[in-house]
């Protein structure tokens, strides 16, 4: 995934995917992650990358406000290494919005920042340790269902009157 024209950094985990696909998977999580909190880790998304066979990988992300946890599976075009990192939600999502149709390459090492490449653009995000992130509910095998993007908001709209306005 690295190219000869880019400055080589010592990394343990890397992944590549389309910005649109990544943004679609992470946008709902951005709504769960509070922008301001007495616990700074809550304004982050937990990314978990697992290297698979033949350079493919799996990725999941988690966000919480300590009352609600939301996880998402992320489609990847490639991955190397296995790692967990807590990336700041708002700056990360803003970069993805501006990336448009381009692919995004992300990499990080132990204790280092996340380096994002979108075309010729390079971003460095100061992240937090994944160990500080509150535990996300473990995914259990069993019933699984999916909805098209427009269905869930319509379902939730019927219960919006019961939500706190804080």
Image (spheres, grey):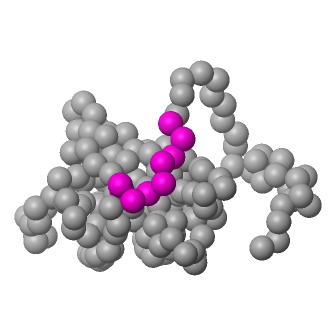
Residue 102 visible within the image? no
Would residue 4 be found to the left or right of residue 166 on screen?
left
The number of discs equals 0
Q: Is residue 109 left or right of residue 142?
A: left
Q: Is residue 123 above or below residue 136?
A: below
Q: Which quadrant does the C terminus fall into?
A: bottom right
Camera-side residue: 116 or 133? 133
Name the residue located 52 percent from the left edge and 34 percent from the top edge: 139
Q: Within the image, what quadrant is residue 19 found in?
A: bottom left
Q: Quadrant of residue 58?
A: top left
**Residue that protrudes farthest toward the top in the picture:** 142
- Identify which residue, 79 or 69, lies in the foreground: 69
Q: Which residues are magenta?
A: 130-138
> Given the current orientation, which residue lies at the most extreme front position?
38
Give the overall secondary structure of the magenta segment.
loop
**Is residue 131 inside the magenta stretch?**
yes
Q: Locate residue 121 relative to residue 27 in the image: left or right.
A: left
Specify the quadrant of the image occupied by residue 144.
top right
- The answer, for residue 109, to whether it is visible in the render is yes
Q: Is residue 77 magenta?
A: no
Depth check: 50 or 4 in front? 50
76 or 63: nearer the viewer: 63
Residue 11 % position (x, y): 15, 58
Give the residue displayed 35% in from the left and 55% down from the top.
131
Q: Residue at x 33, y 74 (%)?
A: 125
Q: Is residue 23 above or below residue 75?
A: below
Residue 21: x and y in percent read 48, 54
Measuring from the top left, give residue 24's x and y in whole percent.
Answer: 55, 56
């Amino acid at each position: 995934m690295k190219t000869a024209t880019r400055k080589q950094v010592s990394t343990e985990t890397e992944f590549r995917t389309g910005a649109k696909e990544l943004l679609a998977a992470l946008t709902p999580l951005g709504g769960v992650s509070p922008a301001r909190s007495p616990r700074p880790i809550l304004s982050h998304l937990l990314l978990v990358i697992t290297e698979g066979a033949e350079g493919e990988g799996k990725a999941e992300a988690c966000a919480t406000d300590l009352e609600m946890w939301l996880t998402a599976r992320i489609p990847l075009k490639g991955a190397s290494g296995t790692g967990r990192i807590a990336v700041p939600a708002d700056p990360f999502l803003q970069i993805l919005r501006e990336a448009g149709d381009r692919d995004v390459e992300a990499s990080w090492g132990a204790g280092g920042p996340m380096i994002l490449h979108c075309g010729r653009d390079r971003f460095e995000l100061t992240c937090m340790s994944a160990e500080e992130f509150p535990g996300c509910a473990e995914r259990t095998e069993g019933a699984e269902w999916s909805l098209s993007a427009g269905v869930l908001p319509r379902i939730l709209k019927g219960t919006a009157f019961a939500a706190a306005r804080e």
